[in-house]
Image: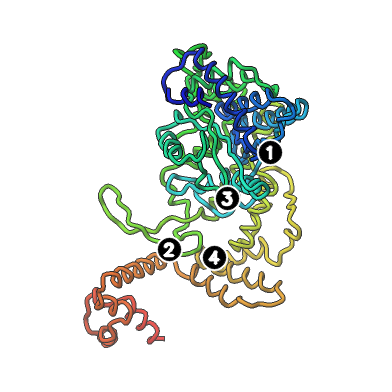
Amino acid sequence: MTTAQQAENKGQQTRTVAELVDYIQALNTEIQELYCLDEIPWVLGVSWGKDSSTVLQLVWNAIAALPPEKRTKTVYVITTDTKVENPVVSAWVRKSLQNLKVAAQKQGMPIDPHLLQPVIEDTFWVNLIGKGYPAPRNQFRWCTPRLKINPANQFIREIVRANGETILVLGTRKAESSKRAATMKKHQVDRVRDRLSPNASLPNSLIYTPIEDWSNNDVWIYLNQCDNPWGQSNKELFAMYRGATADNECPLVVDTSTPSCGDSRFGCWVCTLVNKDKSMEAMIQNDEEKEWMQPLLDIRNELDIKDDRDKRDFRRIWGDVQLFERNKNGEISVEPIPGPYTKYWREHWLRRLLEAQTKTRRTAPENMRDITLITLEEMSEIRRIWLEDKHEFDDSLPRIYQEVTGEEFQDPRPGADYSLLGRDEWIVLEEICEGDAMHLELMAKLLDTERQYRKKARRVGIYETLEKCFNTSSRSPEDAIKNARLKRELSEAVSQGDVAKVKQMTLGDVAAINEVDEGESESDEQVTWASMKFKKENSE
């Protein structure tokens, strides 16, 4: 491994093609030595972009050069399908996996590919449309663990349970970003074996990053000069990156003086963690055959607005009002933290998504006509959440589905279409509540809670559940926010040891109530929330 480690010391210095060839030869030997050193299985994570494709090709070539009797250790190749990948990339991934599987069987390679997916409860649309989670932001990056990390970690844990430990092979590079470089450098200090770093999040697993010090140019030189061993075309990958570059400039990399198109970024088409989806925009701009993706880009841009407070509930997802100090243009104010999307906007996003899916199935190329933006299983789970968790018994999902697609919604969940309450009862309830949204919500929760407990053999806990309905839905938004501010003030008074204020807010000023009752004047500051409450109770 000495030659490869010495080459690593060159860091990000520019390599000539000849130097890169020498380094690849040394790296080939290093991979073979690591592979044959023990019986610890390898898990190779690939996204089928340029970096992970490079690592997979390096590992394949190194193992293929070994005698068949030494190819005894399985290399699990895992790819995570988030279900919201860029459709062009998603098609490329599935094609690559199929080619890899066929070639591995034909060539007697110990490579076992797996396509991983998040569980239905964790998918993007179940969380956004079903639960009402807002579009991801850096402050609330709820998507990455659910869509990418959890499926991969679950698979790796299963390998560890079966074998005791594993080595995770990744295509991460220091040149990707300064943050990535700092993280990798930190892990290098703790290396327990040559080139193997500990995995902080997964016990009994080590990380191997063979191209950690490669540049973008190194990657493209290798992919363009070395044939793909499982029959995939690296030229197609190059063309895909070229099409995802805004200026359509991705020159052929022939030497180290030639820039590459390594800045192209592929990922989820719904991603709002970046300012713009430049790769999809560039694909649509550079290729008329990809204009069919415009409806997807429109939805992504509609989700990605700076202030979506008008689309979200004033309460958190569990029903409480939570406050924060907001600094807007130097003015400090205490405001409620926006919660999940309201019923109207959750239904809106479902309709927009189904419209985009219907349109793209008509306008996409023949090989993409079966595109699925949201699965039947996801819609079934969304429907369950709306009916059972949010008590929205008007059951709007099948109606929206039929209005957009012209087809009847076939729910795969057993007993999903049986309900004592439905659209007709919801309309009657809306008329009774006369436009009072909170009153409608409370009545719907109470009625549906009774319905849910009616089906149970024992109704233990019904009173506590009904009480929760009142705790979260019995106040108007203004009263609920006012009450939260009073609680905040009381908490601050307690923490500051202000006994007088605590007494005033909790016990009330009985004398002030009597004076008000007798018609005597009193300043607004003397009438506390508690005193007004007691006065109201006494008057009743």
Under tag 2, what secondary structure? loop
Asked if labels 3 and 4 touch by Cβ distance under 8 angstroms, the answer is: no
In the image, what residue type sits under mark 2? Val
In front: 298, or 87? Answer: 87
In this picture, is 537 found above or below 393?
A: below
Instruction: Please provide percent x and percent y for residue 498.
Output: 25, 74
Label 4 sits on residue: 441
Tell whether label 1 touches label 3 (CB within 8 Å).
no
Q: Residue 114 carries which label?
A: 1
Badge nearest the viewer, 1 or 2: 1
Which is in the foreground here, disc 4 or disc 3? 3
Q: In the rendered structure, are the residues bearing label 1 and label 2 in contact, judged by CB atoms less than 8 Å apart?
A: no
Q: How far apart are marks 4 and 3 (CA)?
A: 18 Å
Instruction: From the image, state whether disc 4 or disc 2 is nearer to you.
Output: 2
Query: Which residue is labeled 2 in the image?
Result: 321
Query: Alpha-carbon distance for marks 4 and 1?
Result: 45 Å
> Which residue is located at x 53 percent, y 27 percent?
1
Considering only vertical position in the picture, is 217 above or below 358? Answer: above
- Any mark on residue 129, and which? 3
Mark toward the start of the polypeptide (4 vs 2): 2
From the image, state whether disc 3 or disc 1 is nearer to you.
1
Question: Where's residue 13, x and y in %?
Answer: 41, 20
Instruction: Determine the residue located farthest toward the right in the rendered image.
Output: 106
Viewer-nearest residue: 100 or 49: 100
